[in-house]
Every structure is written in structure tokens, then in C-alpha cells.
Image: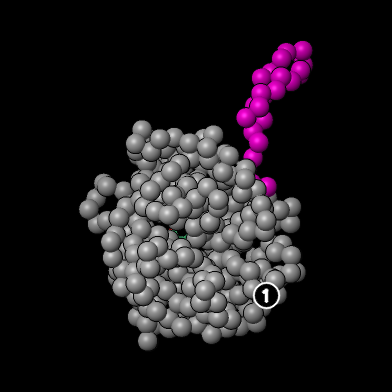
Amino acid sequence: MQQEAAQEGGSVLQRHSYQELFTRYSGNPIIQGLDMPYPVNAVFNPGATMVKGETLLLMRVEDRQGISHFAAARSRDGFSDWRIDPVPTLLPDPRTYPQETWGIEDPRITFLEHERTWTVAYTGYSKAGPVVCLATTKDFKHFERIGAVMPPENKDAALFPVQFSGRWAMLHRPVPTFTGVGAHIWLSFSPDMRHWGDHQMVIQARTGGWWDADKIGLSPPPLWTEKGWLVMYHGVKTTAGGCIYRVGLVLLDPNDPTRVLARSSRWAFGPEAGYEVTGDVDKVVFPCGWVRQGDEIRLYYGAADKCIAVATARVSEMLAWLRDTETACEDVV
Ligand code: BMA
């Protein structure tokens, strides 16, 4: 943060100018409901990855019944000229998978280099509540469902792209039925992506007046950096005017992702632009995917549960910012 003195009307005003970590793309929002080749209510919360040199977004599309499915959009530069599949890319299939009765939501994509496969973690909206589902794909045309891997209520999940001591690891957010304890981010391990165990809580929602009090959840999948796993998570602040969804950063140990190395005290990005402030759900930025090109990260996010936007940041600056705004976790919860 820099402080500047501005001379205005004869008096000296102290003005704070913040160096924003993320820069919104000037062409935001990049995809809206009207861009879809068929009638929809909203398009938001996309997973993101690179496929054959192009950016691919797997978008959550809410139809005009209120039920969500996925549609793929592709772009050469990741900002413009999106080519959207003419028909839904992945529809809920409640007859075979009852966990998808009321739709599929919020996909998070992890590329598994060794397997040359993408794993998509998404929310199945079952009659018993949201569950974590996994599916794999090699082309974003055909998907193989692994099924529901975490019972309700649980969402905001993504796989790490590597194994730890021969096991897959997944971050996710169960919601306890026990009241008053908050909803936190957990880590679980699996030998086969189907059976999960060794559950442990790794990132705890803060309490009281904090921006991330009581309820947090993973945003995009964890990102490998030379300093450790960079994790972006959303925090939900409940106010008299409704909820505000913002995102912050955490760094996990590169070899042991159960260990939190650093956590930002301030949020890194929050709803400010008109399309983030007003929509089907006001004041929401909800990223489910990011793509790294060298030191640049492109963050793809749903804005106000209505449209899709992108913002950029530098990984080196995110790590430096995290160090500068860090708060010892035990002091704040
Ligand atoms: C979360 C999820 C997201 C949604 C957000 C804001 O719980 O359901 O899909 O974008 O709420 O409504």
C-alpha cells in the first residue's frame, strides 16, 4: 500500500492507493447467457484448463428450469472469440446417477500429466443435498463418472495433480450438521479416487467479523509453485444486506499438504465491478479455474451467479502478497 498526498481545494487529503493483485480484463464479462447457442438463465463458475494450446472453460450453465449442466467453451487467447459447444457438453443423468437429480454445478478441473487425463470434481445436487462427484475425460466430449465420493453436504472439491506417498489427495468442504461450528476446508486421501479416508481439516473459517468467518470453500484447484501449493479459497461474509463472496490465499507445504505455511489476512479479490455486484446472487466472485502461463495466472470466475469474467495476476506477486499480508492462523480464528 502506498500513501499519497493529494492537493485538493487548498487542503491536503491523505489518499491511500492500493496496488491491486488482480487486474480485470477490460472486455469483461467474457461470456454471458446471451452468448449461449440455446436459451439459458445464466452461465457462471467455470473450471479451466489448457487443451491443445487453447483455453477450455467447462462452464456451469443454469437452464430455464433452474437445473445446471456443463458446456465447454474454447478460445485461442483465453480472453476472446469463445467457441461454445452447440449442445450441452455434460448433462445431469439422474436415472443412472441419482446424486445428479437437481443438476451438476461448479466443475474444477485437474490435469493428471502421467495419465494424460483430466479429472473433474463437481457438485452433484442430490435430493439429500450437495455431494462431491468425480468424473474423468480425455477430450471434454466423453466423460466417465467415478460417482459420488463424499456424502452430503459437501462441495467445493478439487484433486491435487500429483499423488502423495502413492495416494491421491482432494480438498473439499463438508458442512457439519452440528450447529455453530462453521464450514471448513478438509483434505482426504485415496488410493484409487473412489475410496477416500484419512480426513483432516486443513483450513478453518475464521469467526466474528472476518471476511471469511464461519464458511469457506476451495476456489480453483491447488496450484503448484516453487514455494508450495497455492490455494485460493472463498470466504462468505454474512451481512444485513446479504452474503459477500470474496477470495483469499493460502500456501500449503509442497510435500505435506496438511500443513498450512501461510494464509492471507486480507481478501485478494472481491466483488466491485457492476457485473460482480448485481446478478442472480449479488456480490459474488466465484472462481473455479485458473490457467498459468509462465508467471501469469488467468483467473476465471462466475460473477454474481450470472456471467463469466477473467482477471489476471502474477504468481510471484501473489506469493509476495501472501507473505506480506500473512496472519498466523492460530491468532485469528
Ligand atoms: C455457493 C455455490 C456457488 C454459488 C455461490 C453463490 O454455495 O452454490 O455455486 O455461486 O454459492 O451463490
Q: Position of residue 151 (x, y in %)?
A: 30, 69
Q: Crowding at label 1, few (<14), some or many (≥20) Cα neighbours within 10 Å?
A: few
Q: Tell me how many marks there are.
A: 1
Q: Quadrant of the N terminus?
A: top right
User: In the image shown, does 12 or 112 lie closer to the viewer?
Assistant: 112
Is residue 283 in view from this perspective? no
Ligand 1 is within 8 Å of the C-beta of the residue at disc 1: no
Q: Quadrant of residue 32?
A: bottom right
Q: Residue at x 44, y 49 (%)?
A: 252
User: In the image shown, does 186 or 68 lie closer to the viewer?
Assistant: 186
Q: Residue at x 68, y 47 (%)?
A: 23
Q: Quadrant of the C terminus?
A: top left
Q: Residue at x 47, y 65 (%)?
A: 162
Residue type marked 1: Lys
Q: Which residue is mark 1?
A: 52
> Quick one: which residue is furthest to the top in this view?
10
76 sits to left or right of 300: right
Q: Quadrant of residue 7?
A: top right
> Quick one: which residue is furthest to the bottom in this view?
95
Is residue 316 in view from this perspective? yes
In the image, is residue 237 above or below residue 46?
above
In the image, is residue 58 above or below residue 172?
below
Q: Position of residue 239 (x, y in %)?
A: 43, 41
Q: Quadrant of residue 132?
A: bottom left
In the image, is residue 240 above or below residue 300?
above
166 sits to left or right of 37: left
Q: Residue at x 52, y 79 (%)?
A: 137
Residue 162 in the magenta stretch? The answer is no
What residue range appears in magenta?
1-23
